Every structure is written in C-alpha cells, then in structure tokens.
Image (cartoon, rainbow, N blue to C red):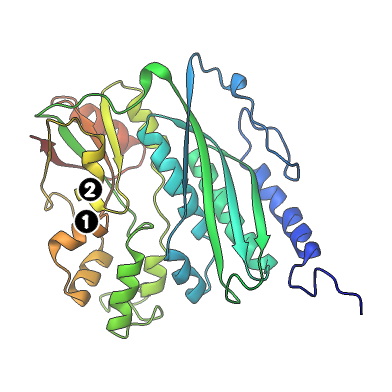
Amino acid sequence: MSLNYKQAGVDIDAGNELVNRIKPFAKATSRVGADSDLGGFGALFDLKKCNFKDPVLVSSTDGVGTKLKVAIDVNKHDTIGIDLVAMSVNDLVVQGAEPLFFLDYFACSKLDVEVASQVVKGIADGCKLAGCALIGGETAEMPGMYKAGDYDLAGFAVGAVERDQILPRPTNAGDILIGLKSSGVHSNGYSLARFILEKNSVNFSDKLSDKLSGEKTVGETLLTPTKIYVKSCLEAIKTGKVKALSHITGGGLTENLPRVLSKNVTPKIDYKSWNRPEIFDYLQKLGNVTDAEMQRTFNCGIGMVLVVAQGDENEVKAILEKAGEEVFVIGELV
C-alpha cells in the first residue's frame, strides 16, 4: 500500500485552495511600499517609498488568547482576525509608529478552508482599519497537535517611526490622562470571563440582558472586535502634544499605564469618569469579582490612554473625537 501526506492528515490541495481564496483579501490591503503577491517564500516591503527621513523599525507580535475558544464554540470566525491585528498594531502606535505590514500564522489539526478564509478576511479587515498591508503568512496543518475543529492564531506587525518622534517622552506630575473608550472586553481576560460563565452555567447563546428585545447574546458580545486606535492616535501624535500612550491589555489600567510613565510619577485615575460597557458589569456581578481584580484583568471600558501636558487636553481631545473616538479625561499624574 502506498501512503501519502493526505492520509497522514495534511491536505496540500486544501492549502492551495485557501491561498487562492485569500489572495483578494490581501490585495485589498495594499499600501505604499507593499507590492509583492502572496505565494513567495518571503514578503517584500520597500521602506524607501514611504518617505521616512530617519526611520526606526518597531515590531510587535501577539495572539488573541482564549477568545479563540469563544469564536470556535460560537462558530463565528469573521471578526477574530480583527482582534489579531489590533493586538499588535495598537502596541506599535504606542511607540509613535505607523504600522506598515502584517503577517499571520494559522495552525490547526485539519484545514477547514471556509473557516480559515473567514479568519483571514477578518485579518485583512483589521489591516485596512490600521492602514497596513497583509503581505504574507503561514498556514500549518498539524494532525495530533490540536483537537478537531480547534485552531490557533498569531500575528506579527512591523511599523516605523522617525527617530526624533519615538514615544514615550518624559512625563510629569500634573499631566492629564485621556482615555479612549473600548469596544468591550477586547482580547484579554477571557480565561476569567469563561470561568465565570462556566461556574454560573451560562451559555454563549444566552441573552446578555432582557432590557431590549433583540439584545446580543453573551457569545456575540464577547466576540465584539478589539478597537483599532491607530489612525486616531497617529492624528493626535502629529500635534506634538502627546507625551505617551498606553494600550490597555492584560493587566488593565493598573499595570499597563505605569509602563510608559517616568519613574517619579504615578497615575491617579477616576474610575467613575466614564461609563463601562455593560459586559463588565455583567461579569463582575455574576462572578462577584472585586474592583481591584476587574481593574487588573480587564480594560474596564478604556482601551487606550494618552498622556498630555495640562492645558493640551482640549486640543488633543477634539482631534480624537473628530477621528471618531469616544474620549474621556480619566485622571492625572501625581
């Protein structure tokens, strides 16, 4: 008997079909500097075409954690790719960098071309929101490594910033903290969220609230894509008034904000200065979670924080609001 790769669980033809399906998605993300087609051994990017004078490259990599389990259990795969892009490009803009290109890694037990193409379409949608090109990636079928129906994702983003515009810059007592509203849980804290739901026998198909007919289910709410703050924050950075940015991911405001501050200052945050999305109140009440645990696990409604000097907050706030952000002054440095 002659054995082959497909019998071992790896379908080369399915992989080729996926590449052909996702080529239009990648092409739709094309931008200055990115001209190569999918299918080569390496992806090319022409930095010179971007007209930087003295660029420094900035890179970031991330996944979406156990939010993937929600997507798989709910069988909704078209937005998880936006989360994947968001987690890396939001980190780039914190350094003052413009995202240039993105690559993804998709691993599974057996390739489901329809599911994978939905995921990659979401990645392309995220790239368009961030203004970067999807220039390559890798799909890996690994029978025996994953359970049937499961898959894993990782993303890799590269951006550039002029050397003299790298953030953060020194921060001082009296500086103002500007918070940008999150779209929900984003992509952190899902192990706790899923644990709370499991302990209370809540299904993803259950309604989050009975207040409105047609209210989203718990699963749909948890799958709300991570907000991509790149374009609005780059506009704010152009003013020269932004001293630092902090992407509020795992660790919440408690642990992420101090990472970009000078050592002699600490944030004083008014947690009542914005309205939390309903999902956070729901999870806190259901799991009897303390305020401190919520604040160090979830973003609690603020996905990005900008630090500006006192007196500059109104100008920066106006620019962010014009770019479509919901903006709050959430505290100051002391």
Q: Earlier in the sequence, mark 1 or mark 2?
A: 2
Farthest bottom residue? 201
Between the residue at mark 1 and the residue at mark 2, the CA separation in whole angstroms equals 7 Å
Q: Quadrant of the N terminus?
A: bottom right
Point out which mark residue 296 bears: 1
Residue type pointed to by label 2: Glu
The residue drawn where x is 44% and y is 48% is 86
Helix, strand or loop at disc 1? helix
The image shows residue 51 at horizontal and vertical percentages of 55, 17
The residue drawn where x is 65% and y is 52% is 138
Report whether residue 158 is seen: yes
9 shown above or below 250: below
Farthest top residue? 53
Report whether residue 179 is seen: no
25 shown above or below 185: above
The image shows residue 96 at horizontal and vertical percentages of 38, 29
The residue drawn where x is 31% and y is 78% is 197
The image shows residue 150 at horizontal and vertical percentages of 56, 71
Left or right of 99? Residue 242 is left
Tell which of 147 and 21 is nearer to you: 147
Left or right of 211? Residue 221 is right
- Count numbered badges in the picture: 2
Q: Quadrant of the C terminus?
A: top left
Helix, strand or loop at disc 2? helix
Label 2 sits on residue: 255
305 shown above or below 166: below
Disc 2 packing (10 Å; few <14; some 14–19; many ≥20)? some
Tell which of 115 and 266 is nearer to you: 266
Residue type pointed to by label 1: Arg
The image shows residue 8 at horizontal and vertical percentages of 76, 73
Disc 1 packing (10 Å; few <14; some 14–19; many ≥20)? some
